[in-house]
Image (cartoon, rainbow, N blue to C red):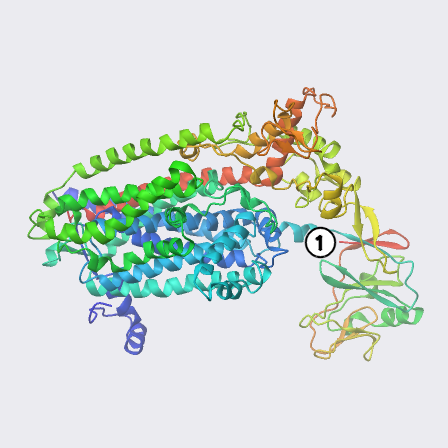
């Protein structure tokens, strides 16, 4: 891609082939001999990391498609089928769902690197605009993919985002109906979203090829922001850049693996483990974290059309950046004023992201408006003016000269600013936590399955199953579990014979037989748990249970959570501090949270007062009483013990491969540590003669 | 000086080989889940558990089809004539030599249980057709006798006998 190639194959066949299709020369000139500035820092490796992540997403996506069913009635359960039954299905799905977040983390670093070092400036305008197009395609792909599990957030996310287009005057409604293929988001929407979600990554890959092409025509920018003047200033792409990229890809994989194996649901929403329900919107509807800054901009504008325009403008303004920035100096290293405004801009983006996650009330709205205004001021006023008033520092004569001088204080400034911003963010969140939520936070419990090496307590799971069988199953189903799961490794530890005996205790409907009749037979291990016998359909359940349907308990432990607030929600993701047991803590608190209503609380008819239930009025009467279930292992027959046991059982039911996940995770981490170390020393050896 | 230059490349080579090897091991380890995910999943395997079939309602001379592991199983209640035909053939003259006694359970000569999939290319043969009173495959013309043995046509082997036992005189368990 950069001029005539010097590639000369030795082998006779390759010579013959090269004369007919010079692909070897193309690869050689693009990825081997290609001269790369020798002063590139590690921020330049994110292009390779992004290519790697695109590959990961495409490969895992193709594999998931082999097991996923894009149908509104089947999609949710087919995802659970992947999580439970498909060989390594849980791993592939967690790789794909967390991979999307990793992709966005990498792209944001890549974009901010471009902003800091002025990589969008002449002659790289087209390269930059192609990048903006890739980013837009990524956002579309991520959004489409998030609808596919067909959980509550999928459904309502799809509804909210497609409704953006209803803001268009005159034709908006028609466009939205056209997008949906119906009068609301439904099966036709899901099927077309699936089709497009499969298509767009390949479109991205195509634009990436153009992006790399444009890069190889203009040459890479570098931290000094000046063009290489001689061969002294560059090194060949292979092995230098290849190994540096490889080292960072390995290091990034460790970061990625941490999320996949230890906090796989951290970046998602508990609500998305509730099957899509067109009749109920989740209490807090929030997009995936990578859209939060734009979501904050949307909500900051009180007018519907103006909000949508602001949202799209905030992305499209990036495409005009090469002409909005009037400074001829590229790198912020030599732009003392721009450097400060750059970091302020980073903080504004982080601040918008935080505000996007908070409810649009009170101080949050005002803060979002200020930051939104600043976001646009940065691009439309500050950048054009800075180029005119700023006196840049003298540029080095060559890249080689710039390598000799290192600038250090940038990172110190950045760290100070980030700590300051964190403190600012903490204040409104504390105010919010105290003012708005009168439901207390569920207390944390000690769980055997928490932490990096957590394992289920088999005795506890067996007791929990007893509680389910004797108390819960009257009203609550366990539809995604089969009897055979009771004997699976990493579960309650029943023997296959015990699981078969448990199955035989249940009556399962089968048929039709040769006479065309449905009939009941004893359960077998391959059968799923039959539905509750007390209600036949949702309408009947609503009649019986005060207008509610008892939720299925299969994934309930992952479908419930509570707000931990700043800064705890950050700490929950950190190695050695990780905490993923919010759902089970909530369940225990709920089961023990029945109380007499406080004076002045209007309890609706048929409701039961519960301290931890969001509305405090829950249709389920207190299900547990001391002594209700007989334990044979000497554990206390108390509500407290029952609540913990059933919650642990529900955690296993929701995440049956939790033990395998943590075990494999440990092996992967050790492996990646070794690989990253080796890559680092190899890279060091190769670069030794450059420095 | 000479000693250092001699020692350096070896240490460097070792590092390169070690890195390459670890990388290759990692790639192979990643490949395994991607390959294994296409194998039958746990629910499919569980659904392939043994099934029991009641032979009582099958009259003499009739062939029924049941499904086990998504494959059709032919259960043939053979007549005296069919049994005689199957037994009197000299197995040595057959393309896939096997006596009839090796294809039925001892003492249950009247019951032939075979997987109903032509051993040529997987079509389902038709019962009571062809020159041997057994099965005829409409796809490519393979002909099987009353013991399900290949007699004529492109199929290389006899119809497969699945694993099964008699749990009582009138009930079998396949699998």
In the foreground, A500 or A415: A415
The chain carrying label 1 is B
In the foreground, A24 or A52: A52
Q: Can residue A88 be seen in this view?
A: no
In the picture, the quarter occupied by the N terminus of chain B is top left
* Quarter of image, res B150: bottom right
In the foreground, A505 or A267: A267
Side of A19 relative to A492 (left or right): left
Q: Can residue A433 be seen in this view?
A: yes
Residue at 19 percent across and 39 percent down: it is: A410
Side of A64 relative to B142 (left or right): left
Location of residue A105 in the rendering, given as x and y in whole percent from the top left corner: 36, 47
Is A498 situated above or below B78? above
Location of residue A423 in the rendering, given as x and y in whole percent from the top left corner: 32, 31
In the foreground, A221 or A357: A357
Location of residue A587 in the rendering, given as x and y in whole percent from the top left corner: 60, 31
* Quarter of image, res A51: bottom left
Residue at 30 percent across and 62 percent down: it is: A130
Which residue is identified by label 1?
B48
Side of A149 relative to A496 (left or right): left
Residue at 73 percent across and 77 percent down: it is: B142
Secondary element at image label 1: loop
Tell me the crowding category of disc 1: few under 14, some 14 to 19, or many 20 or more residues within 10 angstroms, Cα based.
Answer: some
- The tally of labels here is 1
Residue at 56 percent across and 30 percent down: it is: A585
Location of residue A170 in the rendering, given as x and y in whole percent from the top left corner: 46, 66
Side of A260 relative to A635 (left or right): left
């Amino acid at each position: 891609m950069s001029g005539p190639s010097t590639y000369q194959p030795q082998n006779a066949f390759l010579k013959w082939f090269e004369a007919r299709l010079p692909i070897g020369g193309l690869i050689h000139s693009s990825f081997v001999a290609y001269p790369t500035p020798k002063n590139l820092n590690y921020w330049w490796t994110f292009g390779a990391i992004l290519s790697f992540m695109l590959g990961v997403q495409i490969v895992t996506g193709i594999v998931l498609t082999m097991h996923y069913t894009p149908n509104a009635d089947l999609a949710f359960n087919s995802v659970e089928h992947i999580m439970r039954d498909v060989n390594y299905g849980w791993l592939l799905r967690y790789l794909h769902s967390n991979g999307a977040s990793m992709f966005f983390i990498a792209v944001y670093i890549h974009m901010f690197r471009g902003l800091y070092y002025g990589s969008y400036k002449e002659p790289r305008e087209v390269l930059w605009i192609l990048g903006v197009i890739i980013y837009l395609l990524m956002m579309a792909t991520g959004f489409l993919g998030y609808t596919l599990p067909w959980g509550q957030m999928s459904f309502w996310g799809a509804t909210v985002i497609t409704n953006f287009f209803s803001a268009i005057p005159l034709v908006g409604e028609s466009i939205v109906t056209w997008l949906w293929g119906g009068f609301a988001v439904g099966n036709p929407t899901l099927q077309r979203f699936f089709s497009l979600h499969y298509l767009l990554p390949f479109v991205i890959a195509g634009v990436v090829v153009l992006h790399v092409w444009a890069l190889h025509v203009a040459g890479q920018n570098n931290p000094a922001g000046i063009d290489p003047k001689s061969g002294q200033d560059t090194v060949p792409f292979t092995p230098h850049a290849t190994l540096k990229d490889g080292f960072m890809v390995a290091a990034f994989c460790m970061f990625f693996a941490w999320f996949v194996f230890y906090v796989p649901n951290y970046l998602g929403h508990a609500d998305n483990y509730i099957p899509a329900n067109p009749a109920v919107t989740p209490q807090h509807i929030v997009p995936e974290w990578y859209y939060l800054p734009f979501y904050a901009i949307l909500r900051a504008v009180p007018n519907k059309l103006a909000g949508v325009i602001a949202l799209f403008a905030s992305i499209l303004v990036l495409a005009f950046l090469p002409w909005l920035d009037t400074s001829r100096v590229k790198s912020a290293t030599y732009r003392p004023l721009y450097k400060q405004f750059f970091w302020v801009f980073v903080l504004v983006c982080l601040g918008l992201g935080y505000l996007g996650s908070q409810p649009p009330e009170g101080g949050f709205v005002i803060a979002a408006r200020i930051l939104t205004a600043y976001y646009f001021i940065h691009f439309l006023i500050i950048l054009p003016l800075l180029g005119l008033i700023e006196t840049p520092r003298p540029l080095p004569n060559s890249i080689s000269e710039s390598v000799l001088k290192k600038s250090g204080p940038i990172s110190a400034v950045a760290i100070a600013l980030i700590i300051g911003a964190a403190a600012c963010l903490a204040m409104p969140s504390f105010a919010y936590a105290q003012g708005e939520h009168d439901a207390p936070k569920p207390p944390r419990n000690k769980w055997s399955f928490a932490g990096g090496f957590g394992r289920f307590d088999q005795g506890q799971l067996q007791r929990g199953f007893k509680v389910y069988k004797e108390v819960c199953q009257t009203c609550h189903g366990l539809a995604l579990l089969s009897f055979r799961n009771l004997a699976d490794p990493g579960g309650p530890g029943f023997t296959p014979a015990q699981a078969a005996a448990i199955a035989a205790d249940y009556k399962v409907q089968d048929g039709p037989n040769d006479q065309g009749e449905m009939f009941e037979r004893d359960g077998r291990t391959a059968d799923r748990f039959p539905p509750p016998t007390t209600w036949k359909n949702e309408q009947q359940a609503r009649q019986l249970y005060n207008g509610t349907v008892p939720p299925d308990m299969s994934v309930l432990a992952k479908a419930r959570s509570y707000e931990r607030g700043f800064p705890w929600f950050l700490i929950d993701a950190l190695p050695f501090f990780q905490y993923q047991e919010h759902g089970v803590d909530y369940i225990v608190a709920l089961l023990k949270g029945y109380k007499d209503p406080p004076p002045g609380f209007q309890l609706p008819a048929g409701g039961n007062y519960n301290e931890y239930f969001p509305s405090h009025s829950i249709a389920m009467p207190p299900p547990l009483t001391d002594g209700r279930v007989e334990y044979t292992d000497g554990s206390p027959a108390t509500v407290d013990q029952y609540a913990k046991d059933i919650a642990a059982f529900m955690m296993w039911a929701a995440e049956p491969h939790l033990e395998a996940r943590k075990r494999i995770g440990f092996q992967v981490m050790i492996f990646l540590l070794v690989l990253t170390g080796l890559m680092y020393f190899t890279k060091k050896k190769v670069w030794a003669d450059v420095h | 000086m000479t000693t250092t230059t001699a020692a350096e490349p070896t240490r460097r080579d070792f590092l390169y080989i070690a890195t390459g090897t670890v990388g290759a091991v990692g790639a192979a380890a990643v490949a395994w889940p991607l390959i294994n995910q296409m194998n039958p999943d746990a629910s499919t395997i569980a659904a392939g558990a043994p099934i029991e079939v009641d032979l009582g309602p099958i009259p003499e001379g009739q062939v029924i089809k049941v499904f086990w592991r998504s494959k059709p199983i032919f259960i043939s209640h053979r007549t005296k004539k069919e049994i005689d035909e199957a037994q009197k053939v000299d197995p040595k003259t057959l393309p896939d030599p096997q006596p009839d006694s090796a294809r039925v359970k001892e003492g249950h000569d009247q019951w032939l249980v075979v997987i109903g999939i032509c051993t040529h290319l997987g079509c389902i043969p038709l019962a009571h057709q062809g020159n041997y009173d057994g099965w005829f495959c409409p796809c490519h013309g393979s002909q099987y006798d009353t013991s399900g043995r290949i007699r004529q046509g492109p199929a290389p082997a006899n119809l497969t006998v699945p694993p099964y036992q008699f749990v009582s005189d009138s009930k079998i368990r396949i699998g």
